[in-house]
Image (cartoon, rainbow, N blue to C red):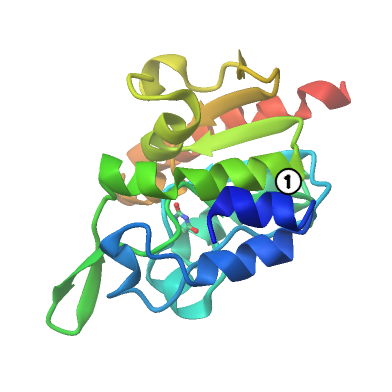
């Protein structure tokens, strides 16, 4: 079953889409991964957050943004008084891509072919949830949503309109913030993430 067929056959049923995605073989990433990590959140969410791909914890648990990056994101959302349970959270790529180093599984960035193969699932999620706002976390998500050639560091934190009128913006990925070390650089990166996410409060003013 194709994502679009699942979406149309089942009307607005996200669960059916999720079930169909569990058997996805559109790219080779399914094989070494534990499971498909599909998006989660209310069907009528106003805001959709799109990340890169599940990490180690997400692959094992089956839920998006539950590992270290997800915890940092939780902290940023809490600081802005945004209730995570109101958001629909998903990823551009729905299987964990990694390299094995002994017992460890090291995150490996998805390639364009993986993003392209997975894109129908993201499109079907967008069609089903019909969010008012899409937030791209990191360059992979921004590429999936805005297309190749989107310069994240130049355009982050600014509203853009998608072809269907949905408003969207991009910011850095919380895992990138975690990679900035321990000191001031990380704090500055974190503050930047929070300031970009503050755009979500624009409508509340
Ligand atoms: N990083 C992502 O991009 N997505 C997740 O779900 C977790 C970490």
Q: Residue at x 62, y 70 (%)?
A: 19
Q: Which residue is mark 1?
A: 128
Q: Position of residue 66 (x, y in %)?
A: 54, 67
In the image, residue 115 above or below residue 139: below
Q: Residue at x 61, y 17 (%)?
A: 163
Q: Residue furthest left?
A: 102
Give the side of residue 186 with respect to residue 66, left or right: left
- Does residue 75 show up? no
User: Which of these two is toward me, 190 or 143?
Assistant: 143
Give the side of residue 100 with respect to residue 31, left or right: left
Q: Position of residue 90 (x, y in %)?
A: 57, 52
Q: Position of residue 94 (x, y in %)?
A: 45, 59
Q: Position of residue 201 (x, y in %)?
A: 77, 29
In the image, residue 169 above or below residue 23: above
Q: Secondary structure at mark 1?
A: helix
Q: Residue furthest bottom?
A: 103
Give the side of residue 9 with respect to residue 178, left or right: right
Q: Residue at x 48, y 72 (%)?
A: 23
Category of crowding for the residue at label 1, using alpha-carbon neighbours closer than 10 angstroms: few (below 14), some (14–19), many (at least 20)? some
- Does residue 138 show up? yes
Q: Residue at x 55, y 45 (%)?
A: 122
């Amino acid at each position: 079953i194709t994502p679009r067929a699942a979406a149309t056959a089942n009307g607005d049923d996200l669960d059916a889409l999720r079930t169909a995605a569990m058997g996805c073989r559109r790219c080779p990433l399914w094989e070494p991964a534990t499971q498909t990590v599909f998006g989660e959140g209310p069907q009528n969410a106003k805001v959709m957050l799109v990340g890169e791909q599940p990490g180690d914890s997400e692959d094992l648990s089956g839920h998006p943004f539950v590992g270290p990056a997800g915890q940092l994101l939780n902290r940023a959302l809490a600081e802005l008084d945004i209730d995570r349970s109101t958001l629909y959270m998903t990823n551009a790529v729905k299987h964990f891509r990694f390299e094995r180093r002994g017992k460890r599984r090291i995150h490996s960035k998805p390639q364009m072919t993986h993003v392209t193969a997975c894109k129908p699932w993201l499109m079907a999620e967008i069609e089903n949830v019909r969010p008012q706002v899409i937030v791209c976390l990191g360059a992979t998500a921004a590429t999936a949503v805005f297309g190749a050639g989107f310069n994240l560091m130049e355009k982050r934190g600014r509203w853009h309109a998608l072809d269907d009128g949905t408003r969207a913006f991009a910011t850095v990925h919380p895992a990138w913030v975690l990679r900035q070390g321990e000191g001031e650089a990380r704090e500055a990166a974190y503050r930047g993430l929070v300031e970009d996410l503050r755009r979500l409060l624009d409508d509340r003013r």
